[in-house]
C-alpha cells in the first residue's frame, strides 16, 4: 500500500505542475499575440527607413556635411548590446544569445578584449546574471526595460548608446538578440548598430541608385532628425523582436511541458491501476488461502 500512496502523491504533484505550465502557456500566448501584431507592423517601416538611411549615408560620403553617426576608423573600443529575458522557462532562448556573445568576443574582438576595450550592455536579467560572473566588463544594465516595453523607454536607452558613440567612448556598437520568426523558431541575430552603414546589403536597390539626391529642407536637418530617429527605431525593433521571440519560446516550452506532464500522468495512472489490481489480487489470494487452511 505504501507504493500505491507514493504513486498517488506523484500523480497529484504532476497534475499541479501541469496546471502551472498550462497557465503559463496561455499567458505567453496572450502576450505573444499582442506583441506579434506590433512587430509585424513595425518591420516594413523600419526596413524601409533603414534603406533610406543607408542611401543618405552614401550620398553624404565625400561632402562637407558631417555625419556624427557615421564616424569610421580603427575599431578599438567596442560595445555589445546583449538582449536576453528577465525570466527563464523559455528553452534555449537565453543560452543561445550568451553563446553567440562569447563567440563574437572570442573570434572577432579578441584583441580588443585582451586590452579591456570590450564592454557589454545587458537588457534582461539572464544575460546580466551570467556575464557579471565573467571577465567581460558590463557598462550597464537595463533589465527593467522589458517589464513594460515601450518605444519611449527604448528610445531613452538608444539615446544613451548613441551619445556614448558620438562622445567617442566606443568605435563600434553591435546588438545580439533573437529575432522572431514564428512561435517555435527564433533566429539568432548579430546586428551592426553604429557607426551607420554606408553600403547597402546585397539585394538592396540603393547600390544601383544614384548617390546624389535633392533634399528638402536640407541634409543638415535630415541628419539631425532622420538618422537619430532611424537608429531609435532600429534599436526598438531589436528589443521588441527579442520580446516577441521570448514569449514564443516560452509558449512552446510550456506547451511541451504540459504535454509531457499529461504523458507522465497517463503512465502513472496505468502504473497505479496495475499496482492496485495486484494488491487486490494478493488480498483475494490471502483470503482464499486462509479459507482453505481452515477447511483442512
Image (cartoon, grey):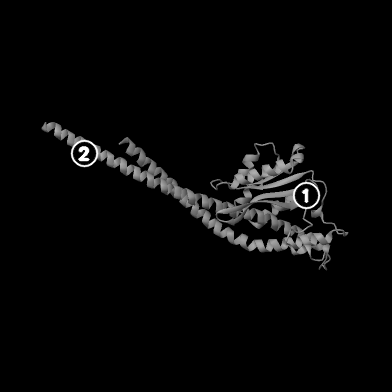
- Farthest residue toward the right? 64
Q: Quadrant of the C terminus?
A: top left
Pick whichever, 296 or 194, lies toward us.
Answer: 296
Number of other residues with Cα within 10 Å of mark 1, as a class: few under 14, some 14 to 19, many 20 or more: many
- Give the side of residue 10 with respect to residue 36, left or right: left
Q: Which mark is residue 104?
A: none
Tags 2 and 1 touching, CB below 8 Å = no
Label 1 SS: helix
Q: Which residue shows up at 80% across the image and 59% down it?
A: 57
Q: Which residue shows up at 21% across the image and 37% down it?
A: 285
Which of the two labelled residues, at mark 2 and mark 1, occupies the earlier sequence position?
1
Q: Position of residue 106 (x, y in %)?
A: 71, 40
Q: Which mark is residue 284?
A: 2
Q: Quadrant of the N terminus?
A: top left
Q: Which mark is residue 165?
A: 1
Q: Which residue shows up at 82% across the image and 46% down it?
A: 74
Tell me: residue 245, above or below residue 134. below
Pick whichever, 295 or 170, lies toward us.
Answer: 295
- Give the side of residue 230 with respect to residue 281, left or right: right
Q: Position of residue 53 (x, y in %)?
A: 76, 60
Amino acid at each position: 500500500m505504501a507504493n500505491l500512496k507514493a504513486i498517488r502523491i506523484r500523480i497529484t504533484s504532476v497534475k499541479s505542475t501541469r496546471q502551472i505550465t498550462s497557465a503559463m502557456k496561455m499567458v505567453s500566448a496572450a502576450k505573444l499575440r499582442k506583441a506579434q501584431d506590433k512587430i509585424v507592423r513595425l518591420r516594413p517601416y523600419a526596413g524601409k527607413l533603414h534603406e533610406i538611411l543607408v542611401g543618405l549615408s552614401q550620398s553624404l560620403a565625400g561632402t562637407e556635411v558631417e555625419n556624427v553617426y557615421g564616424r569610421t576608423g580603427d575599431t578599438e573600443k567596442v560595445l555589445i548590446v546583449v538582449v536576453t529575458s528577465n525570466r527563464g522557462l523559455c528553452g534555449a532562448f537565453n543560452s543561445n544569445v550568451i553563446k553567440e556573445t562569447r563567440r563574437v568576443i572570442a573570434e572577432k574582438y579578441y584583441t580588443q578584449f585582451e586590452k579591456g576595450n570590450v564592454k557589454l550592455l545587458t537588457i534582461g536579467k539572464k544575460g546580466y546574471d551570467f556575464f557579471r560572473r565573467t571577465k567581460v566588463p558590463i557598462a550597464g544594465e537595463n533589465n527593467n526595460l522589458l517589464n513594460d516595453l515601450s518605444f519611449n523607454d527604448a528610445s531613452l536607452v538608444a539615446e544613451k548608446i548613441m551619445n556614448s558613440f558620438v562622445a567617442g567612448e566606443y568605435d563600434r556598437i553591435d546588438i545580439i538578440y533573437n529575432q522572431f520568426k514564428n512561435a517555435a523558431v527564433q533566429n539568432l541575430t548579430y546586428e551592426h548598430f553604429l557607426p551607420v552603414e554606408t553600403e547597402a546589403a546585397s539585394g538592396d536597390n540603393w547600390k544601383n541608385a544614384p548617390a546624389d539626391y535633392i533634399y528638402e529642407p536640407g541634409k543638415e536637418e535630415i541628419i539631425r532628425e532622420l538618422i537619430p530617429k532611424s537608429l531609435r527605431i532600429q534599436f526598438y525593433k531589436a528589443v521588441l523582436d527579442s520580446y516577441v521571440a521570448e514569449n514564443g519560446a516560452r509558449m512552446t516550452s510550456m506547451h511541451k511541458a504540459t504535454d509531457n506532464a499529461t504523458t507522465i500522468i497517463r503512465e502513472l495512472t496505468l502504473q497505479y491501476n496495475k499496482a492496485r489490481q495486484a494488491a487486490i489480487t494478493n488480498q483475494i489470494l490471502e483470503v482464499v488461502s486462509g479459507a482453505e487452511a481452515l477447511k483442512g
